Amino acid sequence: MSVLSLRVNGASHEVDVEPSTPLLYVLRNDLGLHGPRFGCGLAQCGACTVLVDGVALRSCVTPASAARGEITTLEGLAKDGKLHPLQQAWIDEQVPQCGYCQNGQIMTAKALLDRNPHPTDAEIRDGMEGILCRCMTYYRIQAAIKRVAHAAPASAKEGGK
Amino acid sequence: MSAPLRFPRALEDALRRIDPAMSRRSFLASSGALVVSVSVGALPGGRALAQVASGGAGAGPYPDPDFRQLDTWIVIHPDNTATFFVGKTDGGQGTGTAFRQMMSDELDIAYEMTRLVMGRTDTTPDQGGSGGSDAIEVDGWPARRVAAEARRVLLDLASQRLRAPVAELAVSNATVALKSDPKKSVTYAALVGGKRFDVALTGRNVDATTGAAAVKPVNELRIVGQPIKRYDIPAKVDGSLTWAVDAKVPGMLHARNVKPPVAGARLRGVDETSVANVPGLVKVVSRGNYVAVVCEREEQAIQASRQLKCDWAPPAEAPFPSSDRLFDYIRAARPTSGNAPEVVGDPAAALAGAARVLEAEYEVPFQGHTAIGPAHALADPSNGQLTIYSNDMKSYGLRNGVAKFLDIPREQVRVVYMDGPQVYGRTAADDVGFEAAFLAHELGRPVRVQWMRHEETAWDTKGPAYTFKLRGGLDAKGNLAALDYDARAVDYNHVGYNVPDTVLIAQLMGKRLEKPDPGRAETPSVLYAIPNRRMAASVVSLPLIWETPLRTGNLRDPNGPQVTFAFESFIDELAAAAKADPVKFRLDLIGASAEDKVFRRARSLAAIGAAIKAYGWDARPSPKPRDKGKTLSGRGLAYTYRNNTVVATIAEVEVNRETGRVWVKRLVCAHDCGLVINPNGLQHTVECGMLHGLSRALWEEVQFDAEKVTSVDWATHPSLRHSDTPERIDVVLVNGDPNPSRGDLPHYGAGEASHKPVIAAVANAIYDATGVRLRRPPFRKERVLAALRAAEV
């Protein structure tokens, strides 16, 4: 075991774990952050997705010691008591059924929209392709992402359109 | 005990849902019961569970809530809100919201002023949990009746309080007032808030539970029918919900199973020294062929399960044929059971005399649940009782089964149902609940178990594989004169829910039912008038029936998608042979039917009519003249019913001639389930039911060699993805009842019905587009391309 420092959702934490411990178990079991979930342990389904410095990562295969940077989990998306627009869109579109995978869907959508605020339908499908949902809520997930993309202000580059 | 803490609202709601002790506290306090205040730790939410289990209001024992007592179902709080208790579970189909709507409406209280507790064996009446899409259809009735009874009792009390006959009273949002002088009023809370109703109900079983009051006629329902948003969604998207997978208690250990590497293998020995270096190792447990490792931390248990060396003796005989040889095996097998065929008219003579006879064989592979979150449960014995935190949709069965399995009184066992990954039937949530209970019982400490992905995909129960042989005879005018249907399902030793002799751990420990379950093979649910027909269905068995990863169990309408695929495909073949529009061909068969239970004939005609209208169906025979480009497009319809719910589904496909890829561009479902409780929730459930069917049509197949299942993850067992999503989905809610506004219009089920016809609709659309009939799902591109090449498309 060794003491690792992690920055998660704006706060610093020290945890005493084997450095190879997947970040997922540290977040869930040591820090009590239940947004990321175990789905496959193989980086195939995306249920465990977190953002590290804004990049969507599969925490089930990321050693805790490799997670250097600012980690954001589902719990860290809301700011000042206000839901992130994607979370609000998920409610407005009534996206989840069971909801188990939705952490990965929302976190991946955030990384996608942060990169590309106005994706085409094809870019949404492509960007979300690696995140599985077994209740098959894909249709509404895509609708929720489009809702946020349409509401996002046009960027300077797109301003003339 | 600490003072109550303040939580974000969503978390507070989440805790209330899993901890009705919180919502019952004031009620119990004022009724004089001894109450230990339940302190709830702020973070993480799961901590609250420990304190309940180890001495709070839920300390046990846990007698059955009495369904014949109104207090079991409804509590009115001093703040004039209400909590409802129902013994069902909601896997995300919105049944919880629908129950609140029905019960609020009957009670005459605003929806926002109510809460609901579901599926918790110590506090909600045993309605069996979920299954068969029957929550609204069956269990909705006692829920409505008890709420109506509570309203009646409250009106009686108000009549005494306001000194006025009930007929002179009006109720609005939990307040009773004089019609003549609305200022004279009394709230429900002032009448019974925090107190017991102490009203007995009657009914020979929970489904028949009733009081003296009648439910409202449909035209007086105000909350039913509203598109209220699901209450469970906010906490599912902000990360605040405490799920079964999140449940934690102090001193909890983590366990992982070690499954046999080969089906039917016998454990000869375990080399415990192989895990001696794993930090945090607490115990290696083995009993018969069941092996588990228990560690302090989760990642340690995973490491130990990978590292543990076991000596397994392979079985003397191959447990099953490989999946490549499965269908030949089924056709050659001797059936283990079967019902006497249903014979109408003289099908043999009619086939012999038909102007044209068609024959076709269909095949459907094993398909699995493969939940997105592998099975998990936490069992806590720390208060001398046993509490299991689980998302098992049949929490009551889990409780009873575990009590029998461990041979402890059932009053000592309770199951706290919490949200979890999808629950479309008999999943491994059953198995893992027993495993956690066994290990906790063995170690005397709380144990959490979760299956790994390879276990979930390989070892969860499967929907039965099928072969079908169909023959149909058309007369000279192209009418269907005769049909012979012969189905075989690999379903011998079908496992039931939470049976202590058939859960996987019991099988691995060597427990055996004296008589394996005979299994089931089905005939189609359609309303076609076929004057001469023979409908036969039988069950066959694989060589290995115990300790096998190819256990069959209920999967979202257990036989429906397979049977409907074969039958509705064949009806399409017959329509094409008759050069008839496939919709008209079906409408003629239904129109001639003499069967009309629950107005199913009128409703079937209405559903098909609504589907083709929404789609913009142009009547013509299939296939359509083949497109010239690389993309071939077409449409297909399939129709069926599930219990009393009728559906007609249309798929529009694009087939890439060069790659074989099938994209279902559009889906339409016309859905008649009678009275709609919540159109939003229903529409979403229908959408997702269809897309789950689409996943089975395009991707899902359990593959195996002659010793083990080789579908073990999402690479070897693909599922529907974002890129497969249709561009457009239309759900048309139909009410085809001949008297659509009647006051007693029933509410039927939803979920399975929309799932059932999708494989058939997609196959029919592929035929329409390409002229090639695919008789075995999944329609993955390699198989489609091979079929197109073979047909020189």
Image: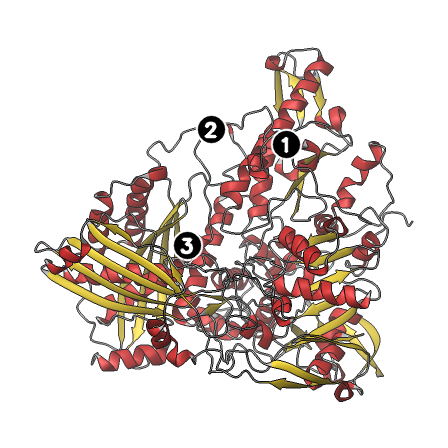
Q: From the image, which quarter does the N terminus of chain A lie in?
A: bottom right
Confirm or deny contact between disc 3 and disc 2 (CB under 8 A): no
- Identify residue type, mark 2: Asn
Count of marks, rendered view: 3
Q: Which chain carries label 2?
A: B
The residue lying at 9 percent from left, 59 percent from top is B355
Instruction: Name the element at disc 3.
Output: helix
Measured along the vertical axis of the image, is residue B669 above or below residue B325? above
Residue at the extreme right: B1
Label 1 is placed on what type of residue? Answer: Ile
* Residue B573 location (% of width, % of height): 21, 63
Q: Give the mark nearer the N terminus: 3 vs 2.
A: 2
**Which residue occupies 65% across, 65% down?**
B432
B781 sits to left or right of B681: left
Upstream in the sequence, badge 2 or badge 1?
1
Say yes or no: labels 2 and 1 on the same chain. Answer: yes
As measured in the structure, the alpha-carbon distance from the residue carrying label 2 to the one carrying label 1 is: 17 Å
Describe the element under mark 2 as helix, strand or loop: helix
Task: Kindly identify which residue carries mark 3.
Answer: B754
Residue occupied by mark 2: B219
Label disc, if present, on residue B650 of the rendered structure: none
Circle number at residue B109: 1
Q: Quadrant of residue B476?
A: bottom left
Question: How far, Cα to Cα, is label 1 from label 3?
Answer: 32 Å
Q: Which of marks 1 and 3 is nearer the N terminus?
A: 1
Amino acid carrying label 3: it is Ser
Residue B328 percent across, percent down from the top left: 34, 76
Query: Which picture quadrant has residue B484?
Result: bottom left
* Residue B621 can be seen in this image: no
Query: B503 or B635: which is nearer to us?
Result: B503
**Pointer 2: residues within 10 angstroms few (<14), some, or many (20+)?**
few
